Amino acid sequence: MLQLLADGLIVGSVIALGAVGLTLTYSILRFANFGQGEFMTWGAYLAVSALSFVLAMTGGGVMEPIGPFSFGWQLIAAMIMAATLTALLALLLDWLLFRRLRHGNAITLVIASFGAALALRNLVQFLWGTLPEYYTREIQISLRLVPRDVMGGLRITPDQMLVIAMTMIVVIGLHLLLTRTTLGRAMRATALNPALARVAGVDVNAVVRATWIIGAALAAIAGVFAGIVGQIRPMLGFDLLLPLFAAAILGGIGSVWGAVLGGFIVGLAESFSVPIFGAEYRAATAFLVLIAILLLRPTGLFGEKP
Amino acid sequence: MIPALEFNAIEGGYEPGLPILRGASLTVMPGEIVALLGPNGAGKSTMVKAAAGLVPIWVGTVRLNGRDITATPAHRMVHEGLGFVPQTENVFTNLSVLENLLLAAALVPKARRGSLDRVFALFPDLDRLRKLAAGRLSGGQRQMLAVARALIASPSVLMLDEPSAGLSPKLVGVVFERLRAVRDAGVTILLVEQNVKAALAIADRAAVLVEGRERLVGRATDLADDRRLASLYLGGGLEEA
């Protein structure tokens, strides 16, 4: 029981970060970006290359782990570089593709994002190959936090605990950005009413750029977290796309805390479904959650009725 | 004297080939309150939206204190000194009252700290409600916040699109009284209104727009008794009065 809870929170952390980026993009750019999952994949792979670069530059080529974790400071540096590069990739994609379609139909943008996702996924396979990658080959022994006779016990690795904690720190940071800074208020204002935002003096194009940067950077961090607790594969982001949408819709499109809560609920639902339906049906759980939300509360937990 | 705001034979609209404004001209002098009147569909709202940069102008110019602002992007208008209060959805309902004002203050460098105190002095109710979400304000309070938001940037000209819409007659009186105070503080006002009586009571001059062109311009006190005004509203021409 406790183990399923922990597993759900770990998966939920990755989903939550990706879903926050998705919900931000949707509320400000006004289209469902099917490329969000690919930003996660690109973030994870760019961190692989950035890590090789950092290790080569610092000499030795060996990463000394920090404390109980399986990785050293070099991976943190690589993650920051990957988030920056993924944000630049998103800006490039906007400049090449979405900017030209912004004044048209939202469906056009959605279909364009499908195409972009397909191109990005294949480009990953072309550049990095199809074999799984890892940030470190260090073997981490999970810690027994709760004995087996208490609710089935709980074992968790320091890396997994760090991913959950870091997710909460990133989300709180984003919350402070949105509520305490001019950029955050401008983003919320633009999400509600772009025309009024322009009249009030908001440079909506700058807000759009900031949204791409933040959404892509969050996706990249989520991708790196997924790589830390699992393996890095070209389908990493694609496989998480449905849970991302389920989380964003469950939370209520446009709500950051809703997306976070939705991410954890989808993660927990996937985890708790394993002993009931078997691991092979785990991925289908997100489908069930999505269908249930659309039937029972289409506006999501924190969404406003139109 | 250089006009505070000057529309010079402007043509424009939402869709190319479908003009709403057909050569409209209007001059607003510094310190004036000018009411822009006219029947539904005359192009009144489109005219102020065009000046605010929200509707394309194809032909003609708009000048603010002598500077050509025809091609200035909407988000730069507050920096030029032109404030605009739209008719509906004119506050950010997902932001608190204070956040609405802080956003406006932060975006315009010339809006110093004192501007917040200044608008709170003009609209004391908002000071009391500063932590409340703007979406929970009453119609009158929202209108006050919308005007306060526009005033934060210290505009030289303020354009308002039907500030009386949806308000009770008593609240209309309160809002218009505040607008008079805004003008007394040195802000020139261009007011689009359907409430002709209330608008003419507060305005110095008025213009009647019909089918995208000004048809009648004069002193508000004169127009209040002018039978041609009713004729234009009823679809007739000037010659029928």
Image (cartoon, coloured by chain):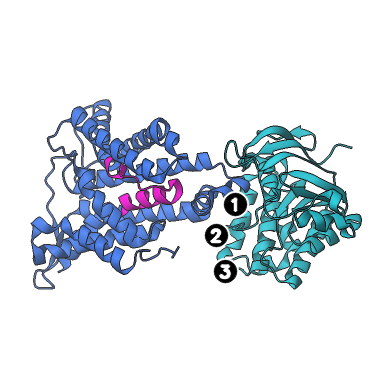
Chain colours: A blue, B cyan
Pointer 1 with pointer 2, Cβ within 8 A: yes
Taking B153 as reference, is B62 above or below it?
A: above
Neighbour tally class for label 1: few under 14, some 14-19, many 20 plus, Cα within 10 Å: many
Quarter of the figure that contains the N terminus of chain B? top right
SS at circle 3: helix
| Host chain of mark 1 | B
Amino acid type of disc 2? Answer: Leu
Residue in the foreground of this view, choosing between A48 and A21 = A21
Q: Report the magenta stretch's main SS.
A: helix
Q: Quick check: can you spot residue B109?
A: no
- To which residue does mark 1 refer? B103
Amino acid type of disc 3? Answer: Arg
Disc 3/disc 2 C-alpha distance (Å): 10 Å
Q: Quick check: can you spot residue B126?
A: yes
In magenta, the rendered stretch is: A15-38
What is the x, y in percent for residue A77?
31, 37
- To which residue does mark 3 refer? B136
Q: Quadrant of residue A124?
A: top left
Do discs 1 and 2 belong to a common subunit? yes
Residue B148 lies left or right of residue A262; in this view the side is right
What is the x, y in percent for residue A212?
41, 41
What is the x, y in percent for residue A280?
9, 56
Residue in the foreground of this view, choosing between B23 and B112 = B23
